Amino acid sequence: RGGRAVALTADHKPEDTLERERIEAAGGFVTERGYCMRVQGVLAMSRALGNRLLKPFVSAVPTVSSYTLQADDQFFVLASDGLYDVFSNQKVVDIAQQAAGPQDASKLLVAKAFEAGSCDNITVIVVALKGARNFSALECGETDTPETRTDAGRTALAQLRAAN
């Protein structure tokens, strides 16, 4: 938001009181392994997609929040904990703002996280919003040019523009 990080989520960590209570109520346990607490001695997150063998201790049920977009909201970042293990929310924003667009920002964040020593999975998606610098230049990706858009794609883009 105007170059300032706004946290839209909170990590679900097994050491959090409510998460630990949920895990233990389901018959699981939380233990310290290495430098962090882990569900069943394995996973450092208490909510995740996949991890079938850790069900029901690791939940895929998200905490859902709603936010009202503001004119100076530039982008949001959806990323795995491998990024946030090494960078604060503000550092992520600062790095992303160095890139020309969302795709470049995603690649840059992954590269910088590796350089910073992240040893976890690093997946990053950056989504540009109306407040992004040069937003009109970001409407078409490298493979989504006006010449290659399908009729359905043109219709969806027109509906999105009309709604905003």
Image: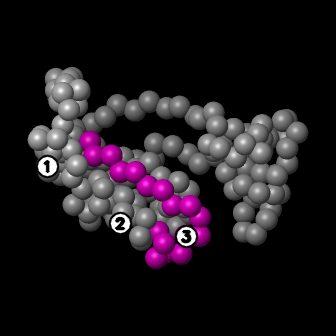
Q: Residue 52: x, y in percent?
A: 72, 42
User: What is the secondary structure assignment of the residue under circle 2?
Assistant: helix
User: Measured along the vertical axis of the image, is residue 162 above or below residue 34?
Assistant: above
In front of the other: 89 or 43: 43
Q: Amino acid at mark 1?
A: Ala
Q: Which residue is mark 1?
A: 137
Mark 2 is surrounded, within 10 Å at the Cα level, by few (under 14), some (14 to 19) or many (20 or more) other residues, namely some
Q: Amino acid at mark 3?
A: Ser
Answer whether residue 90 is magenta in the image: no
Query: Which quarter shows the C terminus?
Result: top left
Q: Residue 53: x, y in percent?
A: 77, 45
Q: Which residue is mark 3?
A: 118
Q: Residue drawn 59% across and 64% down?
A: 120
Determine whether label 3 and label 1 are within 8 Å by CB. no
Mark 3 is surrounded, within 10 Å at the Cα level, by few (under 14), some (14 to 19) or many (20 or more) other residues, namely some
Q: Say whether residue 56 is left or right of residue 7.
A: right
Q: CA distance from mark 2 to mark 3?
A: 14 Å
Q: CA distance from mark 3 to mark 1?
A: 32 Å
Query: Which badge, 3 or 1, comes first in the chain's sequence?
Result: 3
Q: Say whether residue 49 is left or right of residue 41.
A: left
Q: CA distance from mark 2 to mark 1?
A: 19 Å
Mark 1 is surrounded, within 10 Å at the Cα level, by few (under 14), some (14 to 19) or many (20 or more) other residues, namely few
Query: Which badge, 2 or 3, comes first in the chain's sequence?
Result: 2
In front of the other: 73 or 150: 150
The magenta stretch is: 113-129
User: Measured along the vertical axis of the image, is residue 144 above or below residue 101?
Assistant: above
User: What is the secondary structure assignment of the residue under circle 3?
Assistant: loop
User: What is the secondary structure assignment of the residue under circle 1?
Assistant: helix
Q: Which residue is mark 2?
A: 108
Q: Residue drawn 18% across and 52% down?
A: 133
